Image: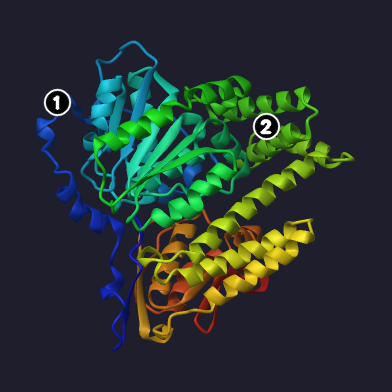
């Protein structure tokens, strides 16, 4: 569940009443005005209320933890039972000839609404449609991610399902969940369609390789949707610039409400057009396509074999760079397995070689990611209009940090002057902080929910921005300092000051706040300040 990070003040009204405003509340109220909801009992031929038969054999831990341990932290599973998870299935009889195409829909609400958007297309094309029940925005993220993979595995047990034509789709908060799962586990999927949501960039380089090779990303937003700037200015250009098949469909004169089935038909057809690319990638790298349910040892060994074959077959520095990146992914994802040991030995061997021309390809790839990130944040900082009102200074501050990293990493001195000019321009925007900022000591916060550390930080950032503060977060700096941004957290804070948020939520996770005027920065805790060293 996205936590409630609300604010209330002592004698000073908040900019919005109690700041308990979220996308799911708005869409739940407006959805019926745009596309009325019929009773599910009237739906033709669905199998409703199916229960997951067994706990998923698929890797639900990786999207949440960034690794695939034998056992996940107990907090991730608290309150969730795989066999209690229900879903609706629109499908032909079991054991029908396959392989079948499958769409799994994640709703913003506990009541499934995917049938309204997807069922006409799925029926017309003979595609299985599964939609989660009781996994709306109010449920913990870990539960929703796990439910997606429980349902996927359950449908796979019933039908012959083609991973190359398995698609995740979701609306609003459900679209965010769909993106999180698909972008972490592209081996299970052929694409993702996010309605009213942005597929945000990822920083796991090995995973990004498989995303580039096989995943198609469709983002469908209205031109009046609050998420539209993120899609148009940042997400779509970033994915395309990194070589990923990504497209945005902008619906004119449309806000955040869910669109009609014609929109899904267009998105589905576009996802299908990437099929040949996915199948070609699977022939080149079998570990990029997972049709069954391999064990950790089997999957890691398969990935290792692919990387070893790539190294043996290529002298091209760019291909060697990709193989070494895959080895790094194996070592990080399954550190306790023999495949990781072998991967580390190969990495050490190549690190000791001279010369190392593949490092040029690696540096160019990383520079491209930095450049795309800085450019996207720069565009957001310069965007005008109500959708970006009050957010430009924060985006400018983040763009400045990205440009500084780009300058430090760029070997081309000729580009430094251009970067300096852009920073100077952005500093003017960052300086335009609201004059109505409420003193921090007169604000109280509520923060409740089951989230990752990154999600908790982002929600706190949004709450601070709403009361007039510019917030600076450099995720890469935090990760470089050893902060686990994917760590699951369960904040249970009500009516507390920001100091309590810092002391009870941030510092135990290795993060502290630095405040200077109206600028609040999230920075790593130094080793001397760590609770373990006190």
For the point 50% across and 55% down, which residue is it? Answer: 487
State the residue at coordinates (35%, 38%).
169
Query: The N terminus lies in which quarter of the figure?
Result: bottom left
Picture quarter containing residue 384? bottom left
Residue furthest to the front: 252
Which numbered marker is on residue 276?
A: none
x and y, in percent, of residue 325 in the image:
68, 39
Q: Earlier in the sequence, mark 2 or mark 1?
A: 1
Q: Name the one closer to the observer, 35 or 358.
A: 35
Where residue 332 appears, as percent x and y from the top left, is 63, 43
Q: On the rendered structure, is 204 left or right of 469?
A: right
From what the image shows, is residue 24 above or below residue 349?
Answer: below
Measure how far apart labels 2 and 1 are at the Cα level: 51 Å
Q: Residue furthest top?
A: 97
Q: Secondary structure at mark 1?
A: loop
| Location of residue 298 in the rendering, given as x and y in whole percent from the top left corner | 58, 25
Q: Is residue 227 left or right of residue 521?
A: left
In the image, 531 versus 86, the foreground residue is 86
Q: Is residue 262 visible?
A: yes
Q: Nearer the viewer, mark 2 or mark 1?
A: 1
Label 2: few (<14), some (14–19) or many (≥20) C-alpha neighbours in 10 Å: some
Residue identified by numbered label 1: 44
Q: Is residue 527 left or right of residue 87?
A: right
Tell me, for residue 338, which label it has, or none: 2
Do the residues bearing badges 2 and 1 touch, measured as CB atoms within 8 Å?
no
Where's residue 513, x and y in %? 54, 74
């Amino acid at each position: 569940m996205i936590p409630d990070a609300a604010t209330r003040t002592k004698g000073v009204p908040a900019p919005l009443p109690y700041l308990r405003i979220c996308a799911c509340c708005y869409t739940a109220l407006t959805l019926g005005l745009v596309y009325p909801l019929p009773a599910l009992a009237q739906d033709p031929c669905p199998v409703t209320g199916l229960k997951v038969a067994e706990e998923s054999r698929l890797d639900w831990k990786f999207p949440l933890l960034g690794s695939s341990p034998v056992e996940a932290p107990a907090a991730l599973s608290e309150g969730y039972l795989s066999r209690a998870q229900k879903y609706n299935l629109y499908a032909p009889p079991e054991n029908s000839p396959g392989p079948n195409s499958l769409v799994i829909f994640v709703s913003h609400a506990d009541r499934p609404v995917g049938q309204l958007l997807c069922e006409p297309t799925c029926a017309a094309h003979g595609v299985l449609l599964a939609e989660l029940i009781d996994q709306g925005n109010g449920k913990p993220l870990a539960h929703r991610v796990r439910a997606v993979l429980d349902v996927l595995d359950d449908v796979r047990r019933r039908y012959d399902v083609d991973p190359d034509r398995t698609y995740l789709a979701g609306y609003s908060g459900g679209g965010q969940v769909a993106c999180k799962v698909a972008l972490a586990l592209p081996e299970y999927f052929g694409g993702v369609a996010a309605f009213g949501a942005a597929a945000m960039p990822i920083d796991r380089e090995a995973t990004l390789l498989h995303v580039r090779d096989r995943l198609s990303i469709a983002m469908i937003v209205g031109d009046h949707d609050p998420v539209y700037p993120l899609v148009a200015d940042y997400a779509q250009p970033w994915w395309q610039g990194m070589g990923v098949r990504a497209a945005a469909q902008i619906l004119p004169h449309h806000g955040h409400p869910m669109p009609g089935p014609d929109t899904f038909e267009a998105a589905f057809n576009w996802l299908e057009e990437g099929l040949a690319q996915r199948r070609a990638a699977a022939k080149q790298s079998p570990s990029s396509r997972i049709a069954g349910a391999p064990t950790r040892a089997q999957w890691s060994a398969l990935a290792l074999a692919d990387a070893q074959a790539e190294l043996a077959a290529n002298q091209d520095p760019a291909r060697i760079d990709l193989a070494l990146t895959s080895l790094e992914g194996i070592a990080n994802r399954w550190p306790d397995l023999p495949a990781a040991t072998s991967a580390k030995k190969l990495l050490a061997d190549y690190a000791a070689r001279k010369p190392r021309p593949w490092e040029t390809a690696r540096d160019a790839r990383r520079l491209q990611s930095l450049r795309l990130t800085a450019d996207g944040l720069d565009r957001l900082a310069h965007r005008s209009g109500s959708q970006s009102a009050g957010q430009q200074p924060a985006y400018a501050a983040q763009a400045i940090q990205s440009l500084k990293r780009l300058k430090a990493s760029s070997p081309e001195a000729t580009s430094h002057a251009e970067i300096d000019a852009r920073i100077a321009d952005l500093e003017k925007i960052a300086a335009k902080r609201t004059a109505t900022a409420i003193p921090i000591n007169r604000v109280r916060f509520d923060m409740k929910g089951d989230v990752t550390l990154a999600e908790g930080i982002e929600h706190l950032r949004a709450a601070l921005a709403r009361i007039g503060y510019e917030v600076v977060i450099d995720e890469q700096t935090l990760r470089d300092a050893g902060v686990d941004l994917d760590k699951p957290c369960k904040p249970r804070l009500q009516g507390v000051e920001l100091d309590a948020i810092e002391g009870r939520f941030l510092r135990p996770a290795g993060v502290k706040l630095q405040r200077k005027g109206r600028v609040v920065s999230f920075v790593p805790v130094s080793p001397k300040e760590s609770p373990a060293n006190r």
